[in-house]
Image (cartoon, helix red, strand yellow):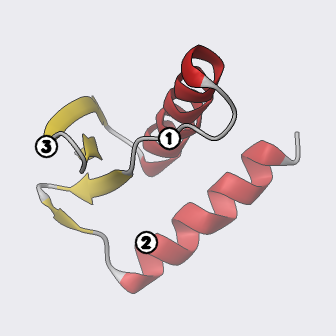
Amino acid sequence: MYTLFDTFNGNTISRHRTLLNAVSASLRFSRSIRRANGDSSYIPTEILRNGKRLSESEIDEMHEIQLSIQSR
């Protein structure tokens, strides 16, 4: 289980079964924050797996997923 976590406010934003869905949710969340508050606005987030930080290989996979989603 992957969790999209708001590190600024200490809140869980959403939970997902796959890393792909968690990354997609993270990108959607970032876009919504920028849309609501301006282009320079952001809230720092982190994707956790079972409440712990991602491993190096999962971080690499996350970056690959982000690139593939953004290139669509």
Q: Position of residue 57 (x, y in %)?
A: 45, 81
Q: Which sits in the foreground, 45 or 1?
A: 45
Alpha carbon separation for disc pair 3 and 2:
22 Å
- Foreground pick, 10 / 22: 10
Left or right placement of residue 14 versus residue 70 in this view:
left
* Circle 1 residue: 42
**Sequence-first disc among 1 and 2:** 1
Q: What residue sits 32% from the left and 38% below the top?
A: 17
SS at mark 3 in the image: loop
Q: Check disc 2 and give the amino acid type.
A: Glu
Above or below, 70 against 41 in this view is below
Label 1 neighbour load within 10 Å: few <14, some 14-19, many 20+: some
**Which residue sits furthest top?**
36
User: Label 2: few (<14), some or many (≥20) within 10 Å?
Assistant: few
Picture layout, residue 38 above or below residue 44: above
Look at label 3 and name its amino acid.
Gly
Q: Which mark is residue 10?
A: 3
Q: Nearer the viewer, residue 20 or 23?
A: 23
